[in-house]
Image: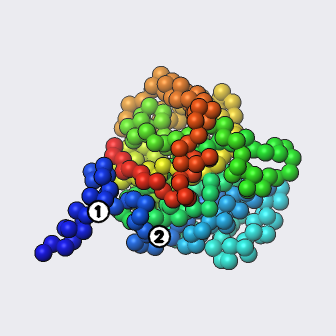
Amino acid sequence: MDHKGDEVRKREDECPGKRKFYPHLCDHWVVTKIMKISVITVCRNSAKTIETAFASVLSQHYSDYEYLVIDGGSEDGTIDLIKKWEPLFNGRMRWISEHDEGMYDAINKGIRMATGDVVGILNADDFLSDDRVIERVAEAFGTTKIDVVYGDVRFIKSPCQGAAVPELTALRGAKTLRYYSAKRWRPWMLQWGYMPPHPGVYIRRECFECLGTYKLGYHIAADYELLIRYLRKAKLALYYLPCCMVGMRMGGKSTKSWRSNLLLNQEIVRGNRENGYFCCMPMLVPKYAFKVFEFVLPWLLRPPSGRNGECKNGRQAGGDARKA
C-alpha cells in the first residue's frame, strides 16, 4: 500500500485551501530540519539605537542562529557597545570593524561571513518585533523547499525621542504610525514600484552564491534591484509569514528628502530595466496612494493577530506560497 501517498493526502485534507502550494505549512507542523539562521546588522556611528537591535536578537527563543555585526569604522562608541554585548551571545555574535564602500558593501561582507542556511538583515535602527521571529522563519524554511520567506514590518513613534535610549519593551509596545503589510504583494508588482519590506525578507544563503549579492553601483535601491533579480527574474519559491517581523523607527536613507526619494525611484526604474522589465517614472506614482493607506490603516483597525501585528500566540498563523 502507498502509505506515503496516504500521508500526503491526509495533510492536504488537514490544510484546506493550501493544496495548490505547500499544504504542510500549518500551525501544528513543527520544524523537520534544524535551520541555522544568520542575522546581519551593518552599522556606522549607531550608538544611539543599536542596543535595541542587539537586545531583540538576544531575546529570541530560537537558539540556532549567528549574529554578524559589520561596523564601518564607528567613532561614537558603537564599537564599545558591540564589545559590551558580544559576551552575552555566548559565541553566537561575530563582528568586524573596518572601512567599507557603503551599506551594501557592508551587507555583502556579512553574507560572505555567514555560515547559516538562511540570511536576514536587521538594520541598526530596527528591532525584531517579538521573541519568536527567528523561530517562525526557521519553521517555514525547515518544513518545505522554499527560497525566500517574507513578512510585514511596522513603523513606530519611538518613545523618549532625543532623550535616553528606550528599552526594547517600550519600543515593542510603541504606537504604530505605519503598518507595511506584504499580504497582497506579488512579484509582478516590482515593476510598478512595490516591494516586500526588505527588513522582513529572509533568503537561503545558497541563493546569494548562485544569483549574486547586492550591486554596489546603487546608492539607495540595491535591495530593490536584488529582489527583482531574485523574486521576479529567477522566480525563487516564496512564502509569506502573516505577521509583523520587524519594528522600524521613522526616517531612513530613502525618505530623507525629495532628492533621495527621486534617486530611489530612478534606481527602481534602472533596476527593472537592467533585469529586462520595462519601467518608467509615471508607473511608480500609484504606489504613493498605497503608502497613504499604510498610515491610515493603524487608525482603522489593529492587525487581527495582535496589537503590533505579531502572529497569534507568537506562531505563524498560516501563510501562502507565491508565484511570479
Identity of the residue furthest to the left in this view: 1
Q: Is residue 227 left or right of residue 20?
A: right
| Tag 2 secondary structure | loop
Name the foreground residue: 119 vs 154: 154
Marks 1 and 2, the one that precedes in the sequence: 1
Identity of the residue furthest to the right in this view: 163
Give the labeled residue for mark 1.
11
Give the labeled residue for mark 2.
35
Identify whether 217 is placed above or below 84: above
Image point (38%, 59%), residue name? 25
1 and 2 marks in contact (CB < 8 Å)? no
Q: Residues within 10 Å of mark 1 (few under 14, many from 20)?
A: some
Which image quadrant: the C terminus? top left
Identify whether 221 is placed above or below 144: above
Which image quadrant: the N terminus? bottom left
Q: Residues within 10 Å of mark 2 (few under 14, many from 20)?
A: many
Amino acid type shown at disc 1:
Arg
| Tag 1 secondary structure | helix
Amino acid type shown at disc 2:
Met
Image point (43%, 60%), residue name? 27
Name the foreground residue: 99 vs 64: 64
Q: Where does the image place residue 31, in percent across and percent down from the top left?
A: 43, 69
Q: CA distance from mark 1 to mark 2?
A: 22 Å
Image point (83%, 56%), residue name? 76
Image point (19%, 73%), residue name? 3
Q: Is residue 192 left or right of residue 153?
A: left
Q: Which one is in front in this view, the residue at disc 1 or the one at disc 2?
A: 1
Q: Where does the image place residue 163, in percent across and percent down from the top left?
A: 87, 47
Tell me if I can see residue 159 in this picture. Answer: yes
Identify whether 311 is placed above or below 185: below
Tell me if I can see residue 46 in this picture. Answer: no
